[in-house]
């Protein structure tokens, strides 16, 4: 990753974000509502945790269930796992779940039962992704190593011509990699670069937390089911299926918002300056999808309203569908883009078409 920090332009002649911020604040004041979560988010939390944990308890208590039912329950756990990540953990680590700091910390900490780590997530997502969205060398979400080419700046390899086929199979390994290798590599790199989010913690505390939570995690999901009598090979298969389902869902949802033709990958100039202000930059690098689909809205934690999320990450996702019209109107008044796909299907097609183009056109390198 490039260590030279980009600097965003301060030239906002259209006063886009100042106008937008005032309008959004007025919306909350006039309706006398808080920007954080409410009963809708609390109810969703109960539903998603039930979806996540009920199949687990069934597996460890009904140890002789047929393999097909065991795999189905593992799939359901994966669906619940992704749902908690997108709704509960995500809002919590953005400080948007509640107006109480301890509640946000507790809900953000749910990432530990999803195989992740709070420190790594907050640095990669809150700091690098939300600040330097879609900037090659700074937004780590664009870095898939050599195996997938997400931008024209990435080196082209012959096998990239097939990446729109094989990428979907690799997407499912996201959270599986979290629990095995990614967290350790990220913590080592972030501490070396002295990156943090909020109040910095000592490396000793961070490493100790990482190791202890990993031990607890594998004890709960690998050791405990075996202790209760579940066959070891079924445990391992179920563990992989759970992670694969969750990883596939999370990867696709995140990719649809940033890796499509409509988004750009701005490159800072020779002195590290980015052409637009930070807020305008978000409009050029982010896309919404299926904004009117209530199920997608509910399950993805508003991540289909990615434009609103990037402009207002500290506002709970339950409000995004309401403030979306404000954002869209203000962007249009300022002659700025507001990209969205009407359906998830069209966004998925656009994403894999974009991967195909990047894989088949080495001249873009």
Image: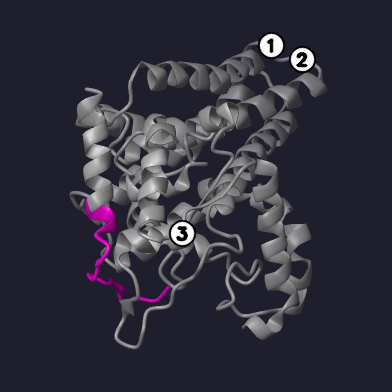
The label number, if any, that marks residue 65 in the structure image: 2
Residue 224 in the figure: left or right of residue 350: left
Percent x, y of residue 177: 57, 51
Describe the element under mark 1 as helix, strand or loop: loop
Quarter the N terminus occupies: bottom left
Mark sitting on residue 337: 3
Side of 196 relative to 85 (left or right): left
Q: Which residue is mark 1?
A: 62
Check whether the beta carbons of the residues at disc 2 and disc 1 lie within 8 A of each other.
Answer: yes
Q: Between tags 1 and 3, which lies in front?
A: 3
Can you name the residue that lies furthest to the front here? Answer: 333
Element type at marker 3?
Answer: loop
What kind of element bears circle 2? loop
Q: Earlier in the sequence, mark 3 or mark 2?
A: 2
Q: Quadrant of residue 289?
A: top right
Q: Quadrant of the C terminus?
A: bottom right
């Amino acid at each position: 990753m490039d260590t030279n920090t980009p600097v965003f332009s301060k030239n906002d002649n259209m006063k886009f974000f100042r106008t937008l911020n005032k309008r959004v604040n007025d919306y909350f004041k006039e309706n006398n509502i808080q920007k954080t979560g409410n009963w809708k988010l609390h109810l969703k939390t109960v539903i998603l945790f039930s979806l996540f944990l009920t199949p687990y308890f069934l597996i460890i208590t009904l140890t002789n269930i047929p393999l097909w039912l065991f795999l189905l329950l593992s799939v359901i756990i994966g669906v619940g796992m992704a749902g908690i990540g997108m709704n509960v953990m995500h809002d919590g680590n953005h400080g948007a779940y509640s107006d109480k700091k301890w509640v946000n910390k507790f809900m953000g900490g749910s990432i530990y039962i999803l195989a992740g780590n709070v420190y790594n997530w907050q640095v990669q997502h809150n700091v690098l992704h939300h600040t330097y969205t879609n900037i090659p060398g700074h937004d780590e979400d664009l870095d898939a190593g050599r195996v997938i080419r997400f931008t024209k700046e990435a080196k082209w390899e012959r096998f990239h011509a097939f990446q729109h086929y094989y990428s979907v199979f690799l997407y499912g390994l996201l959270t599986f990699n979290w629990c095995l290798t990614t967290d350790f590599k990220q913590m080592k790199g972030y501490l070396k670069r002295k990156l943090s989010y909020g109040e910095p913690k000592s490396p000793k505390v961070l490493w100790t937390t990482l190791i202890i939570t990993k031990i607890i995690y594998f004890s709960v999901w690998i050791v405990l089911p075996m202790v209760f009598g579940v066959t070891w090979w079924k445990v391992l298969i179920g563990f992989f299926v759970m992670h694969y389902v969750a990883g596939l869902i999370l990867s696709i949802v995140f990719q649809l918002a940033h890796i499509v033709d409509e988004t750009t990958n701005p490159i800072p100039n020779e002195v590290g300056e980015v052409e637009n202000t930070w807020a305008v930059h978000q409009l050029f690098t982010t896309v919404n999808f299926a904004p009117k689909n209530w199920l997608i809205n509910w399950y993805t934690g508003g991540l289909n309203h990615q434009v609103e999320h990037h402009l207002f990450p500290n506002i709970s996702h339950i409000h995004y569908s309401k403030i979306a019209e404000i954002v869209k109107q203000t962007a249009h008044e300022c002659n700025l883009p507001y990209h969205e796909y009407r359906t998830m299907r069209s966004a998925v097609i656009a994403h894999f078409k974009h991967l195909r183009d990047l894989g088949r056109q080495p001249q873009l390198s």
